[in-house]
Amino acid sequence: MFRITRRVLLAGAVAGVLTLPAAAFEPSGVECIAPANPGGGWDFTCRQVGRALFELGIVKEPVRVTNMAGGGGGVAFAYVVTKRGNDDQLLVAASTATVTRLAQGAYVGMKADMVRWVGTVGADYGVIAVAADSPMKTLGDLMEALRTRPGEVAIAGGSAFGGWDHLKVLIAAKAAGIEDVRAIKYVAYKGGGEAVTALLGGHVQAFSGDISEVVGFIEAGQVRVLAVLAPERLPGRLADIPTAREQGVDAIGANWRGFYAPGGMSDEAYAFWVDAVRRVYGSDLWKKVMAQSGLMPFALYGGELEDFVRRQSADIAALSQEIGLVK
């Protein structure tokens, strides 16, 4: 998993200088589909980037956000491919979770090259968290519970079984020396917001998600993050959160956030949206959003993102096979 993350960081460092010119295309009635219920990472991506597009004057009207939950993003992906394939006014929130499900064949009949990959706006690092009043105080406490009594510990995530939130738990457990990671009880919800709600309601004992999904709950004193799956501690107000690595668990998981567009989108519209996402990412407004939400730098656009998606998909497929999730 470190190999994937290393590529992310290196590619993001060089891709920030890429600029694709916007051709003569006028956005109108723009829609962003968030493939989950309100409250999770995809919803955050659509709403925050949509707001930035309008406030920066890149679009003249507010961006309409449509939540379309189901199938770990598969319902939205199939809808875009089959119903909106030529729509120049449509963006869809995407992430490592999207690539994970595609790599595992979870979107039946769907492939990554059926859409156009537009650009990224940063990356969330994964976290493993518990409720503030949980008796588990460290990542080691959770791993010991999973090792000795896996049936008593349920972990919630906002992706489907075998999705990125699930994989992050298995990556950490494997790094902690747990041999039978398939015995770990994972409960899938339709988005990170629902998964955190389940944690706070006592329906599960831990949460696997991304840092942006729990920042508000941390500040409210409702959630305690046992570990962030980053190479080193995050900056600023998140610096108190220990990494898994410093607790003896060499697990890293970065979830990039960005967009894909319909596969039949015109080249003019595609060039416009690639440049639009790049402009949002480079703005002072977005830098503030990143600082507030815990997003880390990650910048890939157009063809470079499409190349990266192909590589990441191959890496995730290999990992899934290794831990027995796919044949």
Image (spheres, rainbow, N blue to C red):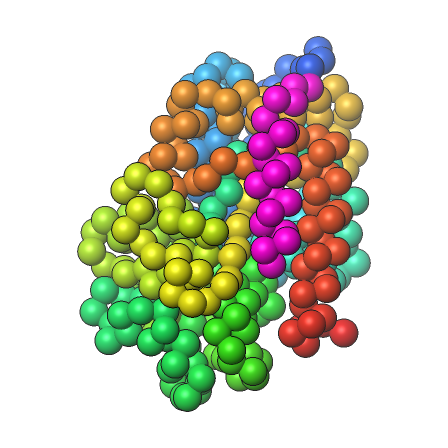
- Look at the picture and state if 28 lies above or below 170: above
Residue at the image point whose x is 48% and y is 79% from the top: 185
Q: Main secondary structure of the magenta part?
A: helix
Q: Is residue 315 visible?
A: yes
Numbered range of the magenta stretch:
1-20
Q: Nearer the viewer, residue 96 or 227?
A: 227
Q: Quadrant of residue 245?
A: bottom left
Give the position of the C terminus as an image quadrant.
bottom right
- Look at the picture and state if 42 lies above or below 209: above
Locate residue 268, reporting x and y percent.
74, 19
Residue at the image point whose x is 56% and y is 84% from the top: 180
Residue 179 horizontal side relative to residue 322, left or right: left
Residue at the image point whose x is 43% and y is 27% from the top: 286
Instruction: Check residue 221 for magenta coloring.
Output: no
Locate residue 197, reporting x and y percent.
33, 62
Residue 204 horizontal side relative to residue 23, left or right: left
Q: Nearer the viewer, residue 89 or 185?
A: 185
Instruction: Check residue 6 for magenta coloring.
Output: yes
Residue at the image point whose x is 48% and y is 30% from the top: 50
Q: Nearer the viewer, residue 193 or 245?
A: 245
Q: Quadrant of residue 22?
A: top right
Locate residue 73, reporting x and y percent.
60, 54
Q: How many marks?
A: 0
Q: Is residue 190 visible?
A: no
Give the position of the N terminus as an image quadrant.
bottom right
